Amino acid sequence: MNVTVFSAYPFERPYLVAAAHQQYSMNFLNEALNLETAEQAAGSIAVAVFVNDDASAPVLERLWALGVRYLLVRSAGHDNVDLPAAHRLGLRVATVPHYSPFAIAEHALALMLALNRHLRQADAQVRRADFRLDNLVGFDLHGKTVGIIGCGTIGGTLARLLHGFGCRLLGYDVQPDEELTGRYDLEYVSLDALCQQADVVSVHAPLTPASRHLLDARQLAKMKPGAMLINTSRGALLDTAAALAALESGHLGYLGLDVYEYEKGLFFNDHSAQPLQDELLRQLLAYPNVLITGHQGFLTRDALTNIAATSLESLECWLTGQPAPNELLLAPPVTAEMAA
């Protein structure tokens, strides 16, 4: 039984091989899935894709014609998959929604702490034998107001961590989880109120057509002067050009990103042999109060184990006639108010 894995990176291959238990023949491809590379899935019953693979309608139609019947999305987000097209074809799709909420939440917290305590600058100075502290003054996270946009599994896990730091928690979500209020004193407010009151804003919402640029110039202007913004969810939730303008004006105090609006074709690959071609990213990286990681929030041994196991468990369910718990079914269209 053949499974073709597109965008198969070295860091994840051992976990996929272990999860296959010699039951499946894993065809690992460095290339991302697109209309041209889809041909390499010929002879496979299933295809496994990652966040930057192209699973649009034309690509899915080509996969179906090649005999592919199952699509395994090795992530929680699936905005790169044309789900209506998949259902029209009869192609079954599953994601990995809960591989490790701690991995993402802890990375978001790591970005907050690293920015606040100027760890990148501190490390660079010490390596130059410069032990001055003048430009490294941070703030206590304890007692600060943190706004969480999207209070699902990952956002809720972050709330748990920040509650331990003694933060006041605000949340914005279309489906408030009252358990978070009871356990962590999280107060649900409007997006406007969250931006106006929070010292730190952390984004954990899905990307949909309605939520694209959820944080635009208008919302950024409502944030407190000097506030911190963290995005470990999807790059296009933030209008990156607007964020750069807010940094240039001094209104936005800190920016931490593990995702980037234009990361497709850039992240997960080595471009060090040539000058950075993305001018927007180049300008962001020039700021000392900006910290960007290359979509590594999920990158823990625990998460990689769960991603591999859950992906192949979905396939096993389908092949044995059982329902896959993480199968994606068609849902009503998401409105702008529902987006986060």
Image (cartoon, rainbow, N blue to C red):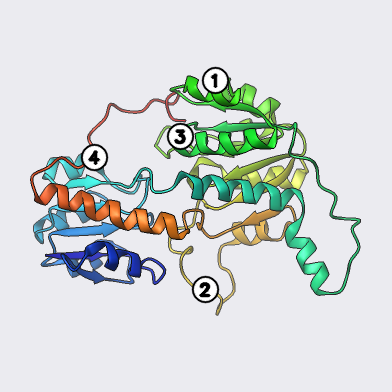
At numbered mark 2, what does the secondary structure look like: helix, strand or loop? Answer: loop
Relative to 264, residue 212 above or below = above
Classify 10 Å Cα crowding around label 1: few (below 14), some (14-19), many (20 and above).
few
Gap in Å between the C-alphas at discs 3 and 4? 26 Å
Q: Which residue is mark 1?
A: 182
Relative to 257, residue 323 above or below = above
Q: Which residue is mark 3?
A: 211
Gap in Å between the C-alphas at discs 2 and 1? 47 Å
Gap in Å between the C-alphas at discs 2 and 3? 30 Å
At numbered mark 3, what does the secondary structure look like: helix, strand or loop? Answer: loop
Would you say 129 lies left or right of 180 here? right
Gap in Å between the C-alphas at discs 1 and 3? 28 Å
Does residue 235 appear anywhere in the picture? no
Please report whichever mark, 1 or 3, sits nearer to the chain's N-terminal start.
Answer: 1
Q: Which residue is mark 4?
A: 325
Write the residue at 55% across / 42% down: 238
Which kind of residue does numbered mark 1 sit on? Gly
Q: Which residue is most to the bottom?
A: 273
Which kind of residue does numbered mark 3 sit on? Ser
Please report whichever mark, 2 or 1, sits nearer to the chain's N-terminal start.
Answer: 1
Residue 271 is labelled as 2
* Residue 68 occupies quadrant: bottom left
Depth check, mark 3 against mark 4: the one in front is 4
Is the C-beta separation of discs 4 and 1 under 8 Å? no
Please report whichever mark, 4 or 1, sits nearer to the chain's N-terminal start.
Answer: 1
Would you say 330 lies left or right of 115 here? left
